[in-house]
Image: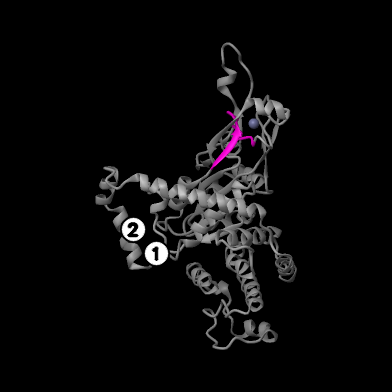
Amino acid sequence: MLPYAKLERYEGNEALFELVMMSIVSTYDGEPLHIHAEGLRGTGKTTIMRAARDILPTIKRITGCIYNCDPADPHCPHHRNLSAQEIVDLGVEEIPMPFLEISHSAKVGTVAGSIDLAKLTDGRNPEARLLPGIIPQAHRGIIFIDEINRLADTAPEITDILLDVMGTKPGHLQIEEAGLPVVHIKVAVSVWAASNPDEEPGPLEEIRRQLSDRFDMVCYMGRPTSEVVLANILKENSHNTKIHTNNSSNNPGDYEKQHERYTQILLRWAERYNQADLPDFLRNYMARLYVKHNLESIRAIEAMQQGAVLYSTIKDRDQASINDVIHMLPLILKHRLDSDTLIRVINDVDVKSGKESMFSFVNKKPNKPDIAEETEYFKNSGRPLKELKRQELINTEKSLDFQVD
Ligand SMILES: [Zn+2]
């Protein structure tokens, strides 16, 4: 697998690189950010997400705690009732921020938890204990799920667990095993998912709308269109490059240094994000958007708030601005709104920010009408987004982002 530092960046995947960084920063600070990358096969969405493991910072936990207890806030069944002194006595260790995957063959026991058979069958000291599953073991880290649309289709019981875990921040997990008391545990994990909406069983929002809404942001991956970029990708994938990389004539230490630099930057952002807040007027503005457009999901404006502050943080700005909100809007709303509402919301923000219409690509009318004509304008000449093919939407997503910046 290619190291993170070596991945090719281009217009169509830049948004995913940004979301990955934002989610790591937020996760490090204890606030999950759930992201979903949609796109055709070969757009590299899973490669980017998996390679992000290279740049994850470390976290401190109570020594040996499989639930990754924060020494300052122990939450697991073994440590939550201990005194401060008892925690100190157990000691602290540093581990890489967890990055675990849920596969399609995963069972509820593997994902949530099951009875610890090794402990149960220990000849000298048999004991019925719980073995936490992938989700509790990923506390304070990331869980990756490839082809989330297929999982939602074939594993409803795992989907229900995800709904609980992603329902609040931090989330909630209930581990049940016959013969053992039910364990309730909090889990702060960011769920990263990928899917190809063009393949069976179709887009996640059509399979399980509730789960789709749990993702704060959805990023539609574009294909590389530049010849230079494609040539670089070909070169990276050629047998020649691979052989020479394996012979380590290409010093792998260089990548490690670069990854270390990324990690340092992430830690600096995390420190800043910890202190950052959204200006009141922007918060009021989001509340107005919610009321005015009757947005169905309050998660949408919560994601707007979190997204705008995180985005301004990774852009090294002191404070979030309306432009940060605009940048995040398509990523936050596309999977939650019907296209007519989406176009109205974005146009609304657009008018507020006094920018050139973001939908000028839809409407070729040369002059932007004033606000009073807004409704008429859309009724008469705006092309409803639902008439666009999905692929066209995915492509214009990028032109949107471009015009905003
Ligand atoms: Zn613990």
Disc 2, ligand 1: is the CB inside 8 Å? no
Distance between mark 1 and mark 2 Cα atoms: 10 Å
Q: Earlier in the sequence, mark 1 or mark 2?
A: 1
220 is within the stretch colored magenta: no
Q: Is residue 391 left or right of residue 72?
A: left
In the depicted view, which residue is nearer to us: 286 or 125?
Answer: 286
Residue bearing mark 2:
233
Q: Is residue 186 above or below residue 250?
A: above
Image quadrant where residue 324 sits = bottom right
Which element type, helix, strand or loop, lies under badge 2? helix
In the depicted view, which residue is nearer to us: 221 or 389?
Answer: 221
Q: Which residues are magenta?
A: 58-70
Residue 190 position, x and y percent, is 59, 48
Residue bearing mark 1:
224
Image quadrant where residue 129 sits = top right
Residue 303 position, x and y percent, is 65, 58
x 57%, y 48%: residue: 191
Quarter of the rendered structure image containing ligand 1? top right
x 39%, y 58%: residue: 8
x 64%, y 70%: residue: 322
